[in-house]
Image (cartoon, rainbow, N blue to C red):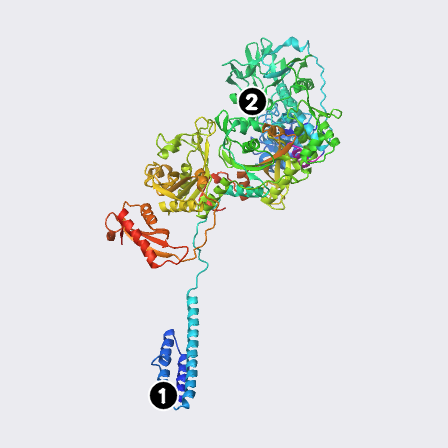
């Protein structure tokens, strides 16, 4: 019987090294360990053994069973791992083939610029003010120190609805409305749509967008204007950006300035973007004219303020290298997808 | 304003190189647009004298000449007919350049060597206006005393640098050489040489003997000054004057007209010269024109005037439109012998409106309309007379005609150095301020702490203006940057409405839609293209009185047309599908109000591989994001712009917040979009009120859901909403969710029937549900479905 058991183990060892599939292994298991298997058959003869032999053979039989089980498991593991390998090999992909398409919505470039500016000034404690696009002449002109007879009020520049109602030509009337309705400290920016009677071409549009800023409080200085616009320029165009003020004229600020930033493309060396000047004009700015403060019921002897404004289209064009303003209003998907 | 540097040099010495000078002027407020030497392209062209002329051996039309160009004699072959031995002419030598990129090199003309070219005025980019005696098409023959071998630019005065300034509208004083010389002097720290005019006045009698002047309308004419010149000899003005006028962009004409233009450029005071012989009455009256009065102007046009226009009349007859243009009937011409120089001050607004009405904007009107200094009229007049004497153009008659109302006195304003420094954020010394102001011709009285403003600076009214005067020379960029230190803090937050709009935008982007921007004005035609009924409230619009054209005449009341145009644009460029959204405004007039209602709206547009349920799904996700409960979709077959079977009103508690649907096929044709285009419009103003942004967390379920699927057959006309209502109302508290997952029509369910399959989820918060509990609920639902809408379980 001992011989028989060793024989079985020997056979299993031989056959286990020769299995080709998981089915072979299952057959092997049934053949030797199954209810009618060889080991079981041998063990059935245990009854015929002597009292002394029985524990010895029993122990041996258990060892043989454990060994067989272990052999079968080894064979099985080996096969599984081989098959896994084969499957992984079969599943090889051409990773250079294109991915599946997921459409992603894109913000319009004008929104990108407006949000970028908004975020800078929200961080500086400004609120975002809004006002009507169809505006009273009083707010669009008079209160801003642009009196009857001023060329800006010409029909060549301004769309009229009635003699005293216009499509606002600037977002400045929002500043007036805010100043009339609140007490300093005032810190706002006013993004919005404005209108001027310009025919459509590569650099003009009768509809465009501006963002203006206004700060009014005690002790506001032109130095504060400079500091604020420095922070703004660095946030928009990078830490190394410098700004330059050039004297200019606006009816509602005094002193007034045009503000240049050092060219973001060439760092001031001179290139196509800045037309070789090293500077790009981006803003108009100045100290709020005392008359404008007075018009809004704010005493210029106590309070002072600054204001600034930039054209969104122009900034977007400069920023993204867009050479034709019409693209912004044509909404060609191939254009919109690029942002 | 174009300024020849040599002209400025009469009043201030400029030693800086042109680049630095331009930079400095820009930074002190006189922006330099550019500078150039207009004739810089001309090189290696010199004066030469023809010493020999011989015929060409092989060509009848050519001659062979020897030309003395100073250091050598060169041989030149030419076809020119107007040259002969002894003539002095411009010679473009070998390797010379001419305007417009022309290069001249030596060559062979029919076998004879030619070492250059003789030039005409055209080849030098000049005209007969610059050199009236020159031949139009022949070689330019120079005066006999011209030195030989000298650069032609030097001889003809073509070597000046011209600087172009952008002058802001508040500084008409800088539309003049003198104004800019004053600014230049302060900018570069040099002395401004005040012009000093002296006259000999050899004419007979006094000015008032010759003509009488009366101002009728002082509101439009503050001053009218005149002087008389007799024994006028009309001829060309000298080269130096023609050259300066040309470089400044003014065409030279004759000595008298050139003098008026020269003084206008130099003093900023427009002038006019009348031929006295043509003034029959010798009775100048400055008055408003009569309605329908006609004047024949210098440019040979008949102009109809009205009583808003100011004219200069001789007796009854208008002889000039004040400040705009003179009349042809008193124009200076070659026979003129006696003139009246006019130097007047007309009202800016009146001149501007008149020029606009007549479509006649001139150098003169452009200056008057900005508002000129009445004090400047007299010095300019005297300067013109000085030039007459200098040019030998006539005899100036002593005395002056000077009608004026009370001339403005100098504005006195307080000098407030402390306030100015506080305002600017600077610590500029008082003395520095005084120095800058004094050099700008402001008078500072330190005892009274007052400033007298020069009459040519009406733009300076108060301390803020004075601050600008000081700081633009102190240096804008010398102001130290600061950040409102010590000021009160403010909150940088968006408003509720702004945040809702951001949320809407983010939701649209997340669903893959592209954001668009379109114009807010449109044409009335779009209403017909949208098939709107005649009484549609959308046809009530805000109208622009001076639109760019019919297509931009009204403010839009709906955004659908622009969305359809964008779809059409992309579709016609073979883009197979796209989805768009726009957040913008529509404009609706309010009766009895000046300003209309401006409404924020969301517009959605889809075309390509989309259907009605695609746009509905977008809206469902949006209202879900905005946490708006109880949104219903009700079919609307009456909206003429949409497919009658595929349009839904979006409602909340009976309140319509928008419309979605497939565009009507006829509308699709009208806008050239694909037939299956889907549009949604939502009223953002209404969304503000319905949305719940104060979201609060609801605990995650602790016990599992039990799911049951129900497929039922119903009549075709039963709508999903009705079925869902029955299920929800009969499902009890345990029913959590009802989802339609399949709709089937076919033989198996019979004609006019459909099978609708729903997934139902049941759950309790406090226990795991038993099958019995769920079965009981389902039985109740089935019984109600049967009794209320006749649904049969499949």
Q: Which mark is residue B352?
A: 2
User: Which residue is nearer to you in this view: B632 or B612?
Assistant: B632
Name the chief secondary structure element in magenta: helix
Magenta span includes B18: yes
**Chain under disc 1:** A
Label 2, secondary structure: give it. Answer: helix
- Decide: is A249 above or below B517: above
User: Which residue is nearer to you in this view: A54 or B732?
Assistant: B732
Residue in the picture at 53% in, 14% down:
B289
Residue in the picture at 43% in, 62% down:
A93
**Neighbour class for label 2 at 10 Å: few (<14), some, many (≥20)?**
many
Residue B455: quarter of image = top right
Residue B212: quarter of image = top right
- Decide: is B238 above or below B748: above
Q: Quadrant of the C terminus of chain B?
A: bottom left
* Image location (x, y in percent) of residue A182: 57, 33
* Image location (x, y in percent) of residue A274: 59, 41
The answer to whether B44 appears left or right of B630 in the picture is right
Residue underneath mark 1: A47
**Chain under disc 2:** B
Magenta-colored span: B16-30
């Amino acid at each position: 019987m001992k011989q028989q058991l060793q024989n079985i183990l020997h056979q299993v060892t031989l056959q286990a090294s020769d299995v080709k599939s998981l089915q072979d292994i299952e057959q092997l298991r049934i053949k030797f360990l199954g209810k009618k298997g060889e080991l079981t058959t041998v063990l059935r003869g245990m009854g015929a053994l002597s009292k002394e032999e029985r524990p010895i053979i029993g122990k041996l039989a258990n060892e043989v069973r454990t060994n067989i089980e272990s052999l079968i498991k080894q064979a099985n593991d080996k096969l599984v791992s081989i098959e896994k390998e084969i499957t992984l090999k079969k599943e090889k992909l051409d990773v250079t083939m294109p991915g599946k398409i997921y459409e992603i919505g894109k913000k319009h470039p004008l929104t990108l610029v407006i949000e970028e500016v908004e975020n800078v000034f929200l961080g500086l404690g400004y609120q975002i003010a809004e006002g009507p696009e169809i505006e009273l002449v009083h707010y669009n002109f008079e209160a801003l120190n642009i009196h009857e007879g001023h060329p800006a009020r010409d029909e060549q520049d301004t769309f009229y609805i009635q003699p005293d109602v216009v499509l606002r030509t600037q977002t400045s009337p929002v500043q007036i409305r805010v100043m009339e309705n609140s007490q300093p400290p005032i810190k706002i920016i006013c993004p919005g749509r404005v209108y001027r009677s310009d025919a459509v071409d590569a650099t003009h549009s009768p509809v465009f967008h501006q963002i203006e800023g206004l700060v009014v409080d005690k002790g506001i200085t032109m130095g504060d204007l400079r500091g604020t616009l420095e922070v703004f320029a660095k946030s928009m165009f990078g830490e190394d950006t410098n700004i330059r003020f050039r004297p200019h004229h606006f009816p509602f600020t005094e002193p007034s300035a045009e503000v240049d930033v050092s060219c973001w493309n060439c760092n001031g060396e001179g290139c196509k973007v800045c037309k070789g000047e090293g500077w790009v004009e981006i803003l108009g700015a100045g100290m709020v004219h005392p008359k404008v403060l007075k018009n809004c019921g704010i005493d210029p002897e106590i309070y002072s303020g600054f204001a600034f404004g930039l054209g969104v289209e122009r900034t977007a064009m400069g920023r993204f290298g867009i050479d034709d303003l019409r693209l912004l209003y044509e909404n060609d998907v191939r254009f919109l997808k690029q942002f | 304003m174009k300024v020849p540097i040599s002209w400025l040099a009469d009043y201030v010495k400029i030693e800086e190189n042109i680049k630095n000078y331009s930079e400095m002027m820009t930074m002190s407020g006189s922006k330099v647009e550019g500078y150039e030497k207009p004739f810089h392209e001309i090189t290696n062209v010199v004066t030469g004298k023809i010493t020999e002329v011989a015929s060409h051996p092989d060509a009848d039309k050519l001659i062979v000449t020897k030309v003395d160009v100073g250091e050598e004699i060169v041989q030149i072959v030419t076809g020119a007919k107007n040259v002969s031995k002894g003539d002095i002419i411009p010679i473009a030598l070998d390797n010379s350049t001419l305007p417009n990129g022309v290069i001249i090199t030596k060559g062979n003309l029919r076998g004879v060597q030619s070492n250059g070219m003789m030039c005409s005025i055209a080849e030098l980019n000049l005209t007969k206006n610059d050199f009236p005696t020159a031949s139009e098409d022949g070689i330019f023959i120079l005066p006999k005393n011209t030195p030989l071998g000298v650069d032609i630019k030097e001889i003809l005065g073509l070597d000046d640098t011209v600087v172009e300034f952008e002058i802001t509208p508040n500084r008409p004083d800088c539309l003049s050489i003198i104004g800019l010389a004053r600014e230049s002097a302060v900018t570069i720290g040099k002395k401004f040489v005040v012009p000093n005019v002296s006259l000999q006045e050899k004419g007979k009698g006094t000015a008032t003997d010759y003509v009488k002047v009366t101002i009728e309308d002082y509101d439009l004419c503050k001053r009218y000054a005149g002087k008389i010149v007799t024994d006028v000899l009309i001829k060309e003005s000298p080269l130096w004057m023609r050259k300066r006028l040309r470089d400044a962009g003014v065409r030279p004409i004759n000595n008298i007209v050139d003098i008026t233009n020269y003084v206008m450029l130099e003093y900023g005071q427009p002038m006019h010269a009348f031929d006295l012989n043509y003034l029959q009455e010798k009775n100048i009256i400055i008055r408003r024109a009569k309605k329908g009065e006609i004047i024949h102007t210098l440019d040979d046009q008949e102009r109809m005037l009205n009583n808003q226009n100011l004219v200069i009349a001789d007796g009854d007859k208008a002889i000039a439109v004040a400040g705009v243009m003179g009349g042809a009937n008193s124009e200076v011409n070659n026979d003129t012998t006696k003139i009246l120089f006019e130097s007047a001050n007309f009202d800016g607004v009146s001149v501007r409106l008149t020029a606009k009405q007549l479509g006649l904007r001139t150098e003169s009107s452009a200056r008057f309309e900005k508002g000129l200094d009445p004090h400047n009229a007299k010095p300019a007049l005297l300067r013109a007379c000085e030039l007459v004497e200098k040019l030998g153009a006539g005899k100036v008659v002593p005395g002056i005609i000077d009608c004026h109302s009370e001339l403005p006195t100098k504005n006195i304003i307080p000098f407030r150095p402390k306030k100015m420094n506080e305002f600017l954020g600077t610590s500029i010394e008082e003395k520095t301020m005084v120095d800058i102001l004094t050099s700008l011709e402001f008078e500072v009285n330190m005892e009274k702490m007052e400033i007298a403003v020069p009459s040519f600076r009406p733009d300076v009214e108060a301390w803020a203006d004075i601050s600008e005067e000081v700081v633009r020379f102190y240096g804008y960029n010398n102001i130290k940057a600061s950040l409102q230190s010590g000021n009160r803090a403010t909150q940088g937050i968006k408003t509720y409405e702004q945040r809702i709009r951001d949320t809407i935008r983010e939701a649209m982007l997340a669903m893959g839609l592209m954001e668009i921007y379109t114009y807010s004005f449109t044409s009335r035609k779009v209403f017909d293209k949208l098939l709107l009924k005649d009484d549609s409230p959308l046809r009530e619009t805000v109208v622009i009185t001076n639109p760019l054209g019919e297509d931009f005449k009204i403010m839009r009341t709906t955004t659908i047309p622009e969305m359809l145009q964008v779809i059409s644009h992309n579709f016609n460029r073979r883009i197979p599908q796209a989805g768009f959204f726009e957040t913008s405004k529509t404009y609706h007039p309010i009766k009895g109000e000046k300003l209309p209602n401006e409404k924020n709206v969301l517009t959605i547009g889809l075309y390509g591989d989309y259907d009605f349920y695609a746009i509905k799904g977008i809206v469902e996700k949006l209202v879900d994001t905005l946490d708006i409960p109880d949104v219903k979709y009700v079919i609307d077959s009456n909206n003429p712009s949409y497919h009658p079977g595929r349009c839904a009103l979006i409602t909340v508690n009976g309140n319509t917040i928008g419309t979605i649907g497939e565009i009507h096929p006829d509308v699709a044709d009208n806008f050239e979009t694909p037939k299956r285009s889907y549009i949604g419009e939502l009223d953002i103003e209404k969304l503000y009120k319905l949305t719940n942004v104060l979201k609060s967390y609801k605990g995650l379920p602790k016990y599992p859901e039990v799911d049951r699927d129900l497929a039922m057959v119903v009549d075709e006309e039963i709508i999903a909403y009705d079925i869902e209502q029955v299920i929800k109302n009969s499902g009890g508290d345990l029913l959590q969710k009802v989802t339609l997952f399949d709709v089937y029509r076919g033989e198996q369910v019979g004609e006019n029937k459909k099978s609708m399959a729903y997934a139902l989820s049941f759950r309790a918060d406090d226990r795991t549900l038993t099958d019995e509990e769920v079965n009981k609920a389902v039985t109740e639902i089935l019984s109600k479905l049967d009794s209320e809408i006749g649904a049969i379980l499949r």
